[in-house]
Structures are given as C-alpha cells and as structure tokens.
Image: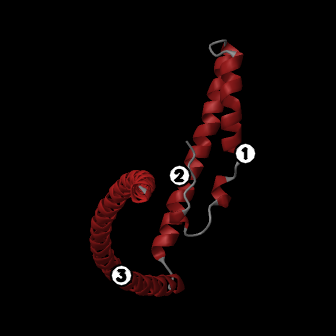
Amino acid sequence: MKTVARSSELEASLKARVAGLTAELNAKAAEVERLKGELSVDTDKLAAAISGTASLESVLCVCRSELAEEKKASGRKVAGLEGRVKELEAELAALNGRMASLRAEDANHRSQPSTFCALTDLVVRRRLYELWVHAEARLDVYKAFHAEGRATEAELQDVTPKLVQLMSYDFVWSVPVCSQFSLIKVF
C-alpha cells in the first residue's frame, strides 16, 4: 500500500509537473507566435526597404546617366562657345585694325587742304543767309497783316518769337569752317 500511495503521490507530482510544463510550453508557444508576428512585420518592413532601395538605386542610375549626358552636352556647348569667342576676338582684332587704318586715313585727309570743305562752307553760308532774309520777310508780312487786321494778335504772338529767334542768330558768321558734318537745322 505504501507503494500504491507512493505511486499515487508520484503520479500526482508528475501530473502537476506535466501541467506546469504544459502551461510553460503553451506560454512559450504563444511567445513564439508573437515573435513570429513581429518577425513577419519586420520582414515586411525589410522587404519594403529593400524594394525602396532597389527603386532608389535605379533612379540613382538614371540620374547618373543623365548627369553624364548633361556633362557631355555642356562640354560640347562650352567648346562651341569658346570657338565662337575666338571667332569674335578675331573679328574684333580685324575691326580694330580697320579702325586704326581709318583713323590714319582720316588724319591724312585732315592734314591736306580740301577745296570741297571751302565750297561747302560757302554754300551753307549762302543758304543760311537766305533763310535769315526769308524769316525777316515773313515777320514783316505778319506785321503788315496785323496792321491791316487780317492777322490776329495771337497769330502774331505765335510766329514772332520763332522768327525773332531765327533772325537774332547770326547765321552768316556762326557756321564753322568745313561744316558739312554740323549743319544747323532751322525748320
């Protein structure tokens, strides 16, 4: 009986121990399931990160190729612009040479007496004198019209300053020698 009681005790002890181990096993199994869920989430995040990295790498590859193409294009453009700058510098040098020769030619012409200049000066002086006489005659006509009553005071006042200014300027003596480049505009 002792054996049976002992056996019952051992059996009860084993059952308690099995029940405790089963509970512990169930807790561990639940923890494993929870960790599997976390691992699944982390795996999904890792997969998303890997696919994002792959897409970023492909974008980076495209950007690098575009950058390389832009560098080549800008290099060609810079080379073209440098060529154009050299052409413009050569053109500028040619124009500077031409300008120097024209200045020398102008200095040569200025050092020689010119009959054209004297002739032009006489023609200009004559024309200016004619304009002065014409302006004086017009003023006299307006004064006569005003005296007869055919021109109003306002018309006379409007015309008089212009004609007086024209007559008061000594055209005959104010024209410089060789004045073909500085003609005075009267009207």
Mark 2 burial class by Cα count in 10 Å: few <14, some 14-19, many 20+: some
Give the residue at mark 3. 82
What's the CA distance linking mark 2 and mark 1? 16 Å
Task: Determine whether 98 is above or below 158 in the image.
Answer: below
Say which residue appears at 38% left-offset and 56% top-offset.
Answer: 32
Q: Which residue ends up furthest to the front in the rendered image?
A: 1
Residue 65 falls in image quadrant: bottom left
Dot 3 amino acid type: Glu
Give the residue at mark 1. 168
Question: Does the image show residue 114?
Answer: yes
Say which residue appears at 62% left-offset and 66% top-offset.
Answer: 176
Question: Does the image show residue 38?
Answer: no
- Return the residue nearer the eye: 82 or 74: 74
Image location of residue 179, percent across then percent down: 55, 65
Q: Which residue ends up furthest to the top in the rendered image?
A: 149
Dot 2 amino acid type: Arg
- Return the residue nearer the eye: 74 or 6: 6
Image location of residue 152, percent across then percent down: 67, 15
Left or right of 180: which side holds 66? left
Give the residue at mark 2. 127
Instruction: Give the label, 3 or 2, closer to the camera.
Output: 3
- Return the residue nearer the eye: 24 or 45: 24
Mark 3 burial class by Cα count in 10 Å: few <14, some 14-19, many 20+: few
What's the CA distance linking mark 3 and mark 1? 61 Å
What's the CA distance linking mark 3 and mark 2? 56 Å
